[in-house]
Image (cartoon, helix red, strand yellow):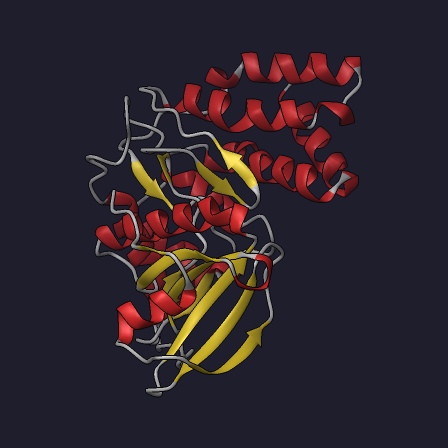
Amino acid sequence: MTTPQCFISLENALCSLFGEGTEIEQSCRISGGDINEAYGLTLTDGKRIFMKSNTKENLPLFTAEAVGLNAIARTKAIGTPRILGVGTDEERGGYSFLLLEFISGKNRGRNYWEDFAVQLAGMHRASTDGLVSGGTYGFGGDNYIGRHRQVNTGGESWISFFRDCRLEPQFQDAVRYFDREDRKRIGCFLDHMGEILVEPEYPSLLHGDLWAGNVITGNDGKAWLIDPAVYVGHAEADLAMTELFGGFPPAFYDAYQEAAPLQPGYERRRDVYNLYHLLNHLNMFGRMYLPEVKRIVGKFS
């Protein structure tokens, strides 16, 4: 895995990347996202770059994001913004930052969704050699799903990995929402995971947080991926996430199924994969997600 270049200040980053004397001529706040602040920066040489910032203690979020983008870019299957670097700056109380290529948002190509599906299938079929430490599924280090740490301890079984490193940590963090009967049902549900999920035909690099807000139109007019929570797993976990918050057009799913047919029974497993994200939202945003979490657990226990 390629780690990003780390700078000791924003001034140091700009000078190292673009030459001595380069400064910010204009800064424009960009809306969107719940965790970081985002800016479009116009430099004195006319270049535009994108910057995310957060408290300096949150530098690991940006480092993990850059590593994830690099892993996706390594597949050469789908576009991602070019990473310029990460760093911290002690000005204004101290902050961390991530610098990326600026996305101009060109018009979408004619077959945008079909092309995206084929590109995503290509990413899912790409080699995962060297991405996981100590197993087939997982990743080389822990990263983040939103603000929540995502455990990526390597293992040889996808089913065990998803149970132990995805669902169980989220259930543990959400324990205050469940009474004794709920906990019994959850225990039964987790014990029977081997009867619900299936092992994949091949391991896939996953984006890990693949909803519509993390797909943008890149500088080539095609779909690009941003804000990853990558790991190696079952491709259908990515597909399930695309359906959680509204879904993509039918043309996307038809094209994906043609490029990389899903294993039988995906529709039944979809809720289990999305339970991970619902639990994460429950832990980050509160009990509005609890009824759906309980519905899915009850469905399988």
Q: Residue at x 60, y 54 (%)?
A: 35
Instruction: Tell me the quarter of the image containing the N terminus.
Output: top left
- Give the quarter of the figure containing the C terminus: top right
* 34 lies above or below 174: below
Tell me residue 222's x, y (percent): 34, 70
Asked if residue 207 is positioned above or below residue 32 in the image, the reply reads: above
Vertical arrangement, residue 226 with respect to residue 287, above or below: below
Judge by depth and name the residue closer to the eye, 88 or 119: 88
Instruction: Residue at 59%, 66% (x, y): give it.
Output: 32
Q: Nearer the viewer, residue 186 or 149?
A: 149
Residue 180: quadrant of the picture: top right
Q: Position of residue 125 (x, y in %)?
A: 24, 44
At 69% across and 38% down in the image, what residue appears? 282
Q: Is residue 47 visible?
A: yes
67 vs 161, left or right, is left
Expressed as whole percent of the image width and height from the top left, the position of residue 234 reads 37, 35
Q: Is residue 253 left or right of residue 3?
A: right
Q: Is residue 212 visible?
A: no
Residue nearer the viewer, 234 or 26? 26
- The correct choice, above or below, for 266 with respect to 78 in the image is above
Dividing the picture into quarters, in which one does residue 134 lie? top left
Give the x, y percent position of residue 226: 42, 58
Between residue 20 and residue 110, name the one nearer to us.
20
Total number of numbered labels? 0
